[in-house]
Image: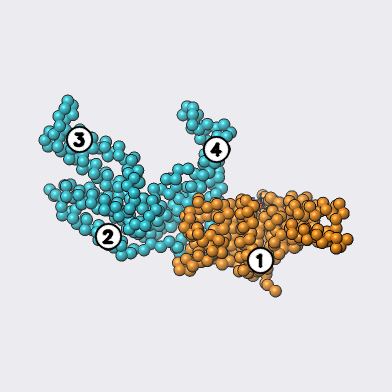
Chain colours: A orange, B cyan
């Protein structure tokens, strides 16, 4: 049984005294090899959670523990070694003049020696499939390629958790799929925790667990299949339900019996072609 | 999009001059700019010209790039030449037609000044032609290093420079996008009286600045999230190293200086 890596204990947060609470009594834990998806409508507080995890913000109430260490002004530099974060806009997080400079940025900040850096640049670029672009300048890369570089830069510091805050939102469906494949492989291979923040319900299907945020509160916390059974409520709090799920619903409405909630096309197909065995 | 603005004038290559440490290049150019003014006779000019041309050929940069770098200053070179030709009234009269009275002294001085100009431009453009902006930044950071002792923010300045260089293409792409978006809404940047055109630039600049500030804010946060906490305790991936080649080039340059001071006329 893996230990808890991230613990939110009754965390409340607001940006200033006058502002309303952005997070209200948020409590959850994430294990050290788990993939958790956080979904919710715009402004539900997802990005705020991400920023709280690596100490870009501090909660007014409650506490946050990363690997057992409380997030405070004093511990943030240690904690940032364990927390890698990739943001939404690929351009605004690319610091280096070339791909290798950008991958090195986080390592340079930690004073890692040159030999180690060179080695890790090779291995992480390989892991995200960007080895051919080591000396390329950012303006010659596509958005998806820049996001891969950002992921490589984060992996280079060997974090214990990787947070993708809508990191695929600006990509086309293909780019999105590729990035998700890359990170899910990395996650299972390197055994790190993965938090994907999204409002694309397609993306949560592969996660081990889903946390649904609504107006700053944890609305539900469950496995993906469970979440999708509550379509009406999901729609009510402003989330799009995947097409397969909607289709399965419509089929049920006309009397087709579907035993378990299908998460993708294959599962629905499975349900349908085995139908006569059950009727 | 204007490619020359993106990477400066840099012409990729692998020549000796390209591989020299950027600090070596900057130092030599700095002193070259000084010694040019000490040349005062044919042999001394010949030495400088030989050095400049030798560097040029060693850089293997195609001549047309070098000429392109010189275009904006041709006018200046010719202008100063003519100025000396008309103004100086020394030596013997070599040309006399109506108001055109040229003296030998004027011709010689005009040529000398033109050569000085030409050499200065040639050598400085060799620097930008064979060195990436980021290498120049690294070199400046390193050479200003001692100023850190008096709390001069050397690292911060260098980082600022390198991030600016990194964002120039991004902001240019954005300018292009905004100007198209505004043009499609009927804003006209290209015709009409100057006053109207200046006014038309405002709807271009305002969104550009707004987005630049937003970028800056996000970039700052991303940098912090990646553990950036100033220059203290930072290591560097890019490394400047003085090689044998650099020492060799320094020696040649010192020989050039000595020859120059031996051959120039005194008194
Ligand atoms: N810097 C800030 N200052 C004040 N309020 C802010 C700031 N950033 C976010 N907020 C507010 O906090 C709330 C939660 O924002 P947050 O960015 O966490 O939402 P989100 O779930 O990530 O939304 P999205 O899906 O749009 O990214 C919003 O109501 C937002 O207006
Ligand atoms: Mg967000």
Between the residue at mark 3 and the residue at mark 4, the CA separation in whole angstroms equals 50 Å
Label 1 lies in ligand 1 vicinity (Cβ under 8 Å): no
Q: Is B160 or A126 nearer to us in this picture? A: A126
x and y percent of residue A98 in the render? 48, 56
- Location of the C terminus of chain A by quadrant is bottom right
Judged left or right of residue A277, residue B52 is left
Q: Are marks 1 and 4 on the same chain?
A: no
Q: Earlier in the sequence, mark 3 or mark 2?
A: 3
Q: Which residue is mark 3?
A: B85
Q: Residue furthest top?
A: B98
**Residue positioned 76% across, 60% down in the render:** A267
- Label 3 vs label 2: CA separation? 37 Å
Which of the pair A164/B14 is nearer the observer? Answer: B14
Local packing at callout 2 (Cα closer than 10 Å; few below 14, some 14-19, many 20+) is some
In the picture, the quarter occupied by the N terminus of chain A is bottom right
Distance of mark 3 from mark 1, alpha carbons? 80 Å
* A234 left or right, relative to B35: right
């Amino acid at each position: 049984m893996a230990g808890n890596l991230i613990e939110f204990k009754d965390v409340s947060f607001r940006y200033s005294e006058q502002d309303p609470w952005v997070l209200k009594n948020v409590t959850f834990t994430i294990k050290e090899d788990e993939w958790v998806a956080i979904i919710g409508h715009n402004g539900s507080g997802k990005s705020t959670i991400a920023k709280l995890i690596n100490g870009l913000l501090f909660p007014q109430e409650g506490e946050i523990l990363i690997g057992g260490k409380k997030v405070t002004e004093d511990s943030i530099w240690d904690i940032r070694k364990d927390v890698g974060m990739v943001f939404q806009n690929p351009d605004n997080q690319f610091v280096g003049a070339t791909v290798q400079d950008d991958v090195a940025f986080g390592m340079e900040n930690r004073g890692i020696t040159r030999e180690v850096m060179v080695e890790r640049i090779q291995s992480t670029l390989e892991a995200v499939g960007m080895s051919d672009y080591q000396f390329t300048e950012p303006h010659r890369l596509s958005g998806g390629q820049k996001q891969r570089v950002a992921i490589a830069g984060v992996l280079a510091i060997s974090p214990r958790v990787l947070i993708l805050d809508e990191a695929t939102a600006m990509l086309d469906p293909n780019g999105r799929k590729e990035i998700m494949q890359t990170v899910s492989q990395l996650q299972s291979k390197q055994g790190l925790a993965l938090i994907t923040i999204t409002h694309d319900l397609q993306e949560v299907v592969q996660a081990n667990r889903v946390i649904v945020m609504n107006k700053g509160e944890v609305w539900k916390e469950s496995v993906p299949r469970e979440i999708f059974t509550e379509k009406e409520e999901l729609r009510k709090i402003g989330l799009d339900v995947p097409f397969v799920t909607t289709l399965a619903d419509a089929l049920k409405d006309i009397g087709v019996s579907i035993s378990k909630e299908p998460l993708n096309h294959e599962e629905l197909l499975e349900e349908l072609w085995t139908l006569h065995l059950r009727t | 999009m204007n490619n020359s603005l993106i990477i400066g004038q840099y012409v990729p290559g692998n020549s000796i001059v390209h591989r020299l440490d950027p600090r070596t290049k900057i130092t030599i150019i700095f002193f070259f700019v000084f010694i040019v003014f000490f040349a005062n006779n044919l042999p001394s000019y010949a030495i400088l010209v030989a050095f400049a041309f030798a560097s040029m050929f060693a850089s293997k940069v195609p001549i047309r790039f070098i000429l392109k770098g010189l275009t904006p200053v041709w006018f200046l070179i010719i202008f100063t030449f003519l100025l000396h030709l008309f103004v100086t009234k020394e030596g013997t009269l070599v040309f006399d037609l109506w108001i055109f009275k040229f003296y030998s002294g004027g011709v010689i001085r005009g040529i000398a000044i033109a050569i000085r100009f030409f050499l200065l431009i040639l050598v400085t453009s060799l620097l930008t032609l064979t060195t990436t902006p980021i290498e120049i930044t690294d070199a400046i950071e390193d050479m200003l290093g001692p100023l850190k002792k008096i709390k001069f923010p050397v690292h911060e300045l260098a980082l600022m420079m390198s991030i600016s260089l990194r964002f120039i293409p991004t902001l240019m792409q954005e300018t292009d996008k905004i100007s198209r978006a505004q043009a499609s809404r009927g804003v006209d940047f290209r015709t009409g009286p100057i006053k109207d055109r200046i006014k038309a630039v405002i709807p271009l600049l305002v969104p550009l600045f707004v987005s630049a500030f937003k970028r800056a804010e996000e970039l700052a946060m991303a940098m912090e999230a990646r553990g950036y906490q100033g220059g203290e305790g930072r290591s560097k991936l890019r490394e400047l190293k003085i090689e044998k080649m650099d020492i060799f080039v320094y020696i040649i340059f010192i020989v050039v200086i000595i020859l120059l001071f031996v051959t120039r006329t005194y008194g």
